[in-house]
Image (tube, coloured by chain):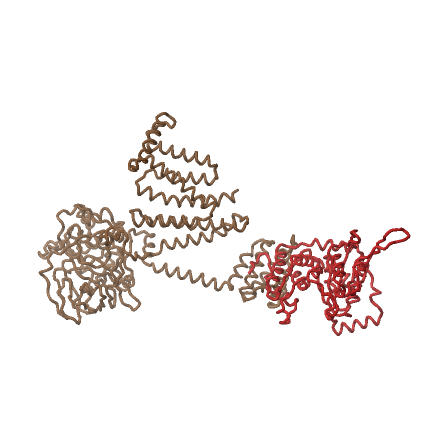
Chain colours: A red, B brown
Amino acid sequence: MNEEVQKIITNIEHVMIGKTDVATLSVVALLANGHVLLEDVPGVGKTMMVRSLAKSISASFKRIQFTPDLLPSDVIGVSIYNPQTMQFEYRPGPLMGNIILADEINRTSPKTQSALLEAMEESSITVEGETMPLAKPFFVMATQNPIEYEGTYPLPEAQLDRFLLKLKMGYPSVTEEYEILSRVQEGTPIEQLEAVMSLEELRALQQQASAIFVDATVREYIVQLATATRTNPYIYLGVSPRASIALMRASKAYAFIQGRDYVLPDDVQYLAPFVFSHRVILQPEARYDGISAEEIMMRVIASVTVPARGFAAR
Amino acid sequence: MIQKIVPKLFVYSLLFLLLREWLLPVVALTNTGYVTYIVGFVGVALLLRLINAHWLITTVVQLSYIIIFIFYVYTDNMQLLSSDAWHFFLTEWRRNLQAIFALELGQVTDVFRSVLLFILIWMLVYLVHQWVTMGYNIFYFFAMTVFFIATLDTFTAYDGQRSIIIVMFTGFLLIGALFIKRLARQTQDHLSLWYRLRLYIPFAMLIIGVIGIGIFLPKSGPTWADPVAYITNGKVSDTTQRKVGYGDDDTRLGGSVADDDTLVFIAEAERSHYFRIETKDTYTSKGWVQQISEETLVPYQTGDTIDSSFIHGDEKEKVTIYNTEVAKKAGFIVQPYATVEVKSVKGALTFNQGTEKMTTDKSLATYESIYSPMHFMYEDIVQTDDIALEVLPAEFDRFLQLPALLPQRIVDLAQQVTEDKPYVLEKAQAIEDYFKHNQFVYDKQNIAMPEEDQDYVDQFLFETKRGYCDNFSTAMVVMLRSVGIPARWTKGFAPGTLNDEGRYAITNNEAHSWVEAYIPGIGWLPFEPTIGFEGIDTIDYTTEQQELEPTEPERETPEAQEEEQTVTEETASKPTLWSKINTWLQQNTWLYYVLLIVICLTVLAMVILRKQWLPGYYVRKFKNKARNRENFMTTYTLLVAQLERFGYARRTGETLKQYAKRIDEAYATTKMQELTEIYEQLVYSESGQSANYEQLHESWEYLINRTTG
């Protein structure tokens, strides 16, 4: 594994117990300049996760609690008249940070949601006709509570497409939970966390990750997987080419984390469910049969021959 | 450049061969001369298309070719650009135009016809070129060519056998070559020459193999009668080939005979026999007739001793004959050598003392011929000299008859052959052997009929040296008579082949003729001059013969002969080692089939069992090869293929890493993962790191050897 990245993950593990994979995937999204949608019940450590990540890379951490009455200006900032200078002054909103935790994103109105998502896509915001670039790196980790549907505004599919990965935290195991309690007893670990890397270094890592080589056969594999989602009987709407691009970007970052300078089909396979499952619309039959999008993705993967030079496709 | 020109050249060479097969029959059938120049025109036209010459150049060159041809062929060294030439051209032009407008096509001169032919070829080449370069398809033209040749072969004198083989070869090869061209166009890929060859060579080998085998396989005769005869005469013409088989009329011998394996009868016998039916005594220089026959018919009762001229012994053995409809209709009774009596349920048989032919007017399904083989010492019969021949009674005259106009050179030859043999038997044997050592060829095809003023034997002995049993036996009888030994021409059936039930099956192909000569003091003895036939062995006069005539390998022991007699008719002209091998091979055609089946089975077995022997082969193959990236990748894929044959196929959706892990778990190693890691690098990374290929090869050898167990 890449040593620099290893440092970040080890650092997060000081705070988060038994969530190495989520930590790794978050770093994948960070390195691939993408954003993460965390879907889980409250209290499993979503906030802790993001904060520890932010702290590890000495990034500025902002948190937005989404509520139904939140306005776009609350997110992107607003110009206020300053009587002393006799001018309007821009007061930056919480988006002007490196790492943003957008908590319970489905609780706010679509208007505010799209302000956030647009910022995620463009890496810039427009306030009163003035376009301002966002900080670099800019990493949004949005959470969404799958239990409560009352008074929520579910994100439309097109908006979900903006997230590189969709992750689930899951409950810790018994021993892990015990370990968590022990750590809390000792003090608040998050406060003791030290940065292991500067933002400058992180940007360099992002640069390196984007230069990872993707062989033609691997690109072909990604396309075949994407095509397979469009023909699967359980899937009503398959993934878009944007999803294929996302999968390739994520695979590059993952390969980089693994310390390789080329992407393997294994990387693609590992990431495909995280990249694809929130971008497809399932047929009602899938729900009747009790099959989740993740499971369907596993089936899709199992149905596509992994191409390799020297072996004929069957 | 070479990548482009080589396939193109190949295609155009094949086209040339194909077009040539169109022209050759046309030229041959219309008695047009100058084939080379006309075919040369095709070559020039194709060459111009090949190099993609500008249409102006093409036109000028081809027109010049035509004009030069015309001047070369139709004028006497006329200067090309002289006024004479101009005049010649104008007159021809005017005359032919007039003839055409007057619709008098007979008046059109040869010059004009030649020009037309050339223009036709020009168009044909243009069309073929279009098909090849635009449509990449020559199938219709190829099919047309086959149809054309087949039609010519059927309805005209043109022999299309050679032609059709060439057309098949070139046509299929062309189709294959054009298919690859089409493939290259469809896939929009640049296929390298080497890649094309790899596609093409197996195909070409297949074509050559299949057509090659086809050429050498035996072919059954046509199922339909010659359609031309039906069309022209309304009935099958008499000029078609005769079939082999037994017949009564021998007045005109010669000509080719076709095979006919209609079963005539089946003989149940202890050993192989020559089945004698009748003899003939008078040679007409075209064939055989019988001098006295009608007057000598005597009835024969079952159980009587046959009054044949043939000597016999005491012990009796029998041959049971089961007739087919063919033999029932013919009504003959076959007599193995030294037949003493014939037993049949329906009595009434007739014996002809003149021809020694026994017949029945009833349809006999079966009968028994009882024979008694002779045994006598060789020295008893060998020592009879010419003097005994001079005092023969008058009844032998008919066996010494010769045509009045028999060419003297036959007599001279017979005397020359028998010159230094003092005894009658030796003389007869010398003549019998003469055919074996003087470039005579056994063949049923392409056999001449004697001309009106030609002697049948003379033609065979001195001109053709090629023929079947009738030629050999008649020649021997005539030669024997020329030196004063009484001889007669004997007809019947050769021994035939043993069938599965241990019986001898005699078909029309076994219809045969041989020789009987009279040895004073002993009687009539059979001789077999036809090369490829083993001779009659029921007469056992072999005891000490080897001392006297060690050169004759045929009559060694009866047992040995029996085995060999299953073989019927072969050729052997030169006693060289090669021809011996050749003869042996020809006699043992079953060997080819056995060999072919063995080879097929071996190949099949090797394919089925390849998972057992392939690893060993691969290990040896790569033992001394360089340990480098390419060889490593090749060996890795071979290993995966081998594992697949062992049931460890890579599953759909399984990456190489997962696959390697599974294999390693199955074989309890880590070597597959080692190999796979390097292979993945080579396959999926940009550059591919250097690796210790020597060590990897060892792991590979270890794994692939494990798969054989």
Residue B20: image location, x then y, percent: 38, 43
The answer to which image quadrant residue B293 occupies is: bottom left
Tell me if B382 is positioned left or right of B17 in this view: left
Q: How many marks?
A: 0
Q: Inspect this view and state whether residue B675 appears.
A: no
- Residue drawn at x 30%, y 52% as measured from the top left: B575
Quarter of the image for the C terminus of chain B: give it: bottom right
Tell me if B392 is positioned left or right of B601 in this view: left
Up the image or down, A213 lies above or below B28; here it is: below
Residue A167: image location, x then y, percent: 71, 65
Tell me if A189 is positioned left or right of B87 in this view: right
Q: Inspect this view and state whether residue B17 appears.
A: yes
The answer to which image quadrant residue B298 occupies is: bottom left
Depth check: give the residue in front, A140 or A71: A71
Residue farthest top in this picture:
B83
Depth check: give the residue in front, B704 or A161: A161
Up the image or down, B226 lies above or below A67; here it is: above
Residue B313: image location, x then y, percent: 17, 66
Up the image or down, B678 lies above or below B62; here it is: below
Residue B641: image location, x then y, percent: 55, 61
Up the image or down, B428 lies above or below B312; here it is: above
- Residue drawn at x 33%, y 44% as measured from the top left: B25
Depth check: give the residue in front, B210 or B564: B210
